Structures are given as structure tokens and as C-alpha cells.
């Protein structure tokens, strides 16, 4: 007979019931706050649409933070030759292929104010105005939000686990 087996089994039982969702939720909210604080702002749309979600699948609890606008990824990683030349600060785990040729954007696909803000070259044709784009440098806001807060996220999750135990 081993002394303390019942007590040890109770501790293991409590460990198996630890709820990670709340700690992960606090951690991913911290990442979201940081991403919002560091994202570049033109009209505020990107900042307002940085979302989070906590999901559970079998034994995995995952916190996700993402931009819910098409251009959010382009801002993070950069585009075209300019993005390839300047993408410092993006995740080293992402392999990005940058288009090397300029591309044309029809006036129906971009607000004139945005095109003028970025000083896009344009031509007027019978089919309308076309703006030439050569890309943009990366302006990472998501990856740094996670990387710069790793220790604090781990701390928040740990505090929630301690509360439960």
C-alpha cells in the first residue's frame, strides 16, 4: 500500500478539470489590444476590425487574433517589390511570395481618396481611370503584438490555472 495515493489521485482529478479557456481568452485579448494600438491607421477600419476568438477542439484550446478586412494581411506582410524590399518584423514562419510587376487597379475597385493618399500614378482610358500600384512595405502589427507579449500571455494563463487549483 502506498500512502497518499488517494490524495494524489484527487490532485490529478483536479488537474484534468482545469479550464484553459478563460486564461487563453485573457491572453488573446491582450494580443488584440496590442495589435490595435500598433496597426497603421488611415480611416480606422483595420483597427476596428481586429477580432479574436477562443476555440476548443478535443484537448486543444486556441486563441486567434486576425484582421477581418481584406487588406489587413497586405498591411501586415507588405505587397509587391516594396514589400519584398521591406518586410522586417513579419513572422519568420511565413514564406511570402511577392509579385514583382506593378499592377493596375480600376477606379471601381478603389476610392479616389485612397489612391490619391498613396500618390498612385494613374491613366485615364475610355474604360475609366486606372491606378498603378507597385506595392507597399510591410507594417507588421499582428506578429509583434503576439511576440512582444508572449511572457505576459503565459503569465495570464498561469494565473488562471492557479486560481482553479
Image (tube, rainbow, N blue to C red):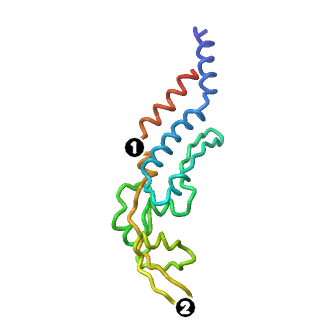
Could you say where residue 1 lies in the image, as x and y percent from the top left? 61, 9
Looking at the image, which is closer to me, 1 or 40? 40
Number of the label disc, if any, that sits on residue 101: none
Q: Quadrant of the C terminus?
A: top right
The residue tagged 1 is 148
Classify residue 96 by image quadrant. Answer: bottom left
Could you say where residue 89 lies in the image, as x and y percent from the top left? 37, 55
* Residue at the image point whose x is 49% and y is 40% from the top: 30
Q: Residues within 10 Å of mark 1 (few under 14, many from 20)?
A: few
Q: Secondary structure at mark 2?
A: loop
Mark toward the start of the polypeptide (1 vs 2)? 2
In this rendering, position of residue 6 left or right of residue 134: right
Q: Secondary structure at mark 1?
A: loop
Q: CA distance from mark 1 to mark 2?
A: 50 Å
* Residue at the image point whose x is 57% and y is 49% from the top: 51
Q: Residue furthest right?
A: 58
Could you say where residue 158 lies in the image, as x and y percent from the top left? 50, 29
Q: Determine whether 153 is above or below 76 in the image.
A: above
Q: Residue furthest bottom?
A: 126
Q: Determine whether 25 is above or below 15 in the image.
A: below
Classify residue 55 by image quadrant. Answer: top right
Number of the label disc, if any, that sits on residue 126: 2
Amino acid at each position: 500500500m502506498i500512502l497518499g495515493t488517494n490524495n494524489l489521485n484527487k490532485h490529478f482529478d483536479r488537474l484534468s478539470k482545469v479550464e484553459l479557456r478563460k486564461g487563453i481568452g485573457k491572453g488573446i485579448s491582450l494580443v488584440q489590444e496590442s495589435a490595435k494600438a500598433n496597426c497603421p491607421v488611415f480611416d480606422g477600419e483595420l483597427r476596428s476590425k481586429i477580432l479574436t476568438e477562443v476555440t476548443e477542439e478535443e484537448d486543444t484550446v486556441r486563441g486567434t487574433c486576425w484582421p477581418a478586412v481584406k487588406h489587413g494581411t497586405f498591411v501586415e506582410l507588405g505587397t509587391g517589390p516594396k514589400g519584398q524590399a521591406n518586410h522586417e518584423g513579419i513572422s519568420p514562419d511565413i514564406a511570402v511570395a511577392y509579385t514583382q510587376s506593378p499592377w493596375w487597379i480600376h477606379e471601381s475597385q478603389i476610392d479616389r481618396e485612397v489612391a490619391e493618399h498613396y500618390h498612385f500614378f494613374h491613366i485615364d482610358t475610355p474604360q475609366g481611370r486606372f491606378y498603378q500600384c507597385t506595392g507597399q512595405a510591410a507594417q507588421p502589427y499582428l506578429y509583434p503584438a503576439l511576440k512582444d507579449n508572449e511572457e505576459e500571455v503565459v503569465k495570464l494563463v498561469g494565473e488562471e490555472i492557479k486560481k482553479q487549483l
